[in-house]
Image (cartoon, rainbow, N blue to C red):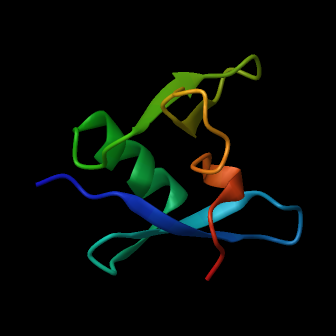
Amino acid sequence: MAEKVVAVRKNGDGDIVELKLSSGQVVDYKQAQQMAKDGQIEHVNVFKGRDGDEHLRSDPDGREDNNLDNLPTF
């Protein structure tokens, strides 16, 4: 069964560096990207930004409360 992101940890610049999953597991950003690509995390996807790097984001659903940046921090 796929995990859900329930909370995030940000660095001093406000960038997400770790994600807490519904199982309680904490994964770093790169690991979360790979898990999303593998279908192991629900409601998120990986896209290539204008900077050429891959980024993780919530699936668009018209809600802002479940965007990664708006999730609780831990």
- Which residue is located at x 48 percent, y 31 percent? 59
- Which residue is located at x 53 percent, y 24 percent? 47
- Which residue is located at x 41 percent, y 53 percent? 32
Q: Is residue 59 left or right of residue 49?
A: left
Percent from the top left, x then y, of residue 17? 63, 64
Q: Quarter holding the N terminus?
A: bottom left
Percent from the top left, x then y, of residue 5? 43, 60
Instruction: Compare residues 21 and 26 and report the one nearer the observer.
Output: 21
Where residue 9 sits, quadrant-wise, is bottom right
* Residue located farthest toward the top when viewing the structure as drawn: 50
Where residue 39 sits, quadrant-wise, is top left
Above-or-below relation of 69 to 48: below
Q: Is residue 46 left or right of residue 11?
A: left
- Which residue is located at x 53 percent, y 57 percent? 29
Above-or-below relation of 63 to 22: above
Percent from the top left, x then y, of residue 36? 34, 41
